Image (cartoon, rainbow, N blue to C red):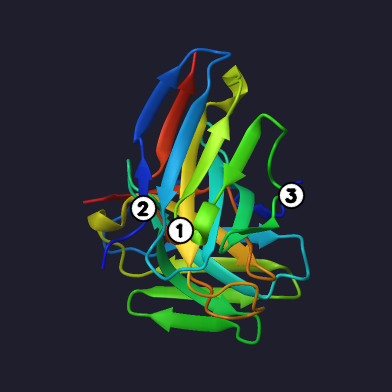
């Protein structure tokens, strides 16, 4: 039972444009959501998070949006840079333990 | 400050053999997690230690997998006997605080151990 879903396995954008990565979840008990970034041969690293009491959190070029009624969150990267090319994992937490999506491979072309 | 470390980085074994993976969490982190990622799929939760106690082992696939964290420091994950479907990347993560709903429960991940069962 996959509680966190990232339906797009890959995304390709041009440098300078906006990247939008999407994530859906099914468990209404989740109240904290995170995005992790993963480079090849490395473990995931924390990128940005959002609590369920908010609908937006911004950190530099990265913004996460949460729509609780739709059980949907998205990560916006603007402007996208070639160094942003990586696999992005959405994660959701309800009581400390986290559940991850399958990841979206983002490629930013120069 | 040293991050989460995992050993070995790669392991190639034959079906039926035993393999033991090790994870050293960040010093002072009581919470330790094991995850597995198989063939580009989701990072799947295996289990969660709080110090030396298993808080949640609902993700362990079967009794061929045994995780321990004696003394509440490093942890081992043993697979015995290994099967083909056990191949994947095993990640360990640690966090300072856990079990608190809505808290900044950032988990720090190790680089993973890539296990290949032939």
| Rendered residue at 38%/80% (across/down) | A59
Task: Give the x, y percent position of residue A103.
Answer: 51, 48
- Report, in whole angstroms, how far the alpha carbon at label 3 lies from the one at label 1: 21 Å
Q: Which percent across, then down, holds residue B87?
A: 53, 26
Question: Would residue A82 appear left or right of A59 to someone viewing this image?
Answer: left
Q: Are marks 2 and 1 in contact (CB under 8 Å)?
A: no
According to the picture, the residue beneath numbered tag 2 turns out to be A13
Identify whether A69 is placed above or below B24: below
Mark linked to residue B58: 3
Q: Residues within 10 Å of mark 1 (few under 14, many from 20)?
A: some
SS at mark 2 in the image:
strand
The answer for which chain carries disc 1 is B
Describe the element under mark 1 as helix, strand or loop.
Answer: loop
Q: Are marks 3 and 2 in contact (CB under 8 Å)?
A: no
Q: Which residue is mark 1?
A: B73
| Residue A78 visible here | yes
Question: Which circle, 3 or 2, is nearer the viewer?
Answer: 3
Q: Chain of mark 3?
A: B
Percent x, y of residue A26: 76, 60
Label 3: few (<14), some (14–19) or many (≥20) C-alpha neighbours in 10 Å: few
Outermost residue toward the bottom in this view? A53
Residue B107 seen from this side? no
Q: Do the dots labelled 3 and 2 sit on one chain?
A: no
Residue occupying the point 41% across, 58% down = B25
């Amino acid at each position: 039972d996959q509680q966190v879903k990232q339906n797009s396995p890959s995304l390709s954008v041009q440098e300078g444009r906006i990247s939008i990565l999407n994530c859906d979840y099914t468990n209404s008990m989740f109240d904290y959501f995170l995005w992790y970034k993963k480079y090849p041969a490395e473990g995931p690293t924390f990128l940005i998070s959002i609590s369920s009491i908010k609908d937006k959190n911004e950190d530099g070029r990265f913004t996460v949006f949460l729509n609780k009624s739709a059980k949907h969150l998205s990560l916006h990267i603007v402007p996208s840079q070639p160094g942003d090319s990586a696999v992005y994992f959405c994660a959701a937490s309800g009581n400390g333990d986290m559940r991850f999506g399958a990841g979206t491979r983002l490629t930013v072309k120069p | 400050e040293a991050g989460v470390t995992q050993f070995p980085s790669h392991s190639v074994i034959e079906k039926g053999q035993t393999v033991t993976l090790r994870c050293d969490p960040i010093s002072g982190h009581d919470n330790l997690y094991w995850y597995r990622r198989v063939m580009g799929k989701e990072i799947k939760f295996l289990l969660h230690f709080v110090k030396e106690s298993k808080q949640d082992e609902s993700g362990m696939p079967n009794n061929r997998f045994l995780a321990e964290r004696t003394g509440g420091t490093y942890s081992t994950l043993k697979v015995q006997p290994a099967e083909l479907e056990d191949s994947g990347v095993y990640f360990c993560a640690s966090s300072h605080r856990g079990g608190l709903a809505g808290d900044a429960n950032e988990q720090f991940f190790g680089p993973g151990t890539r296990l290949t069962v032939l």
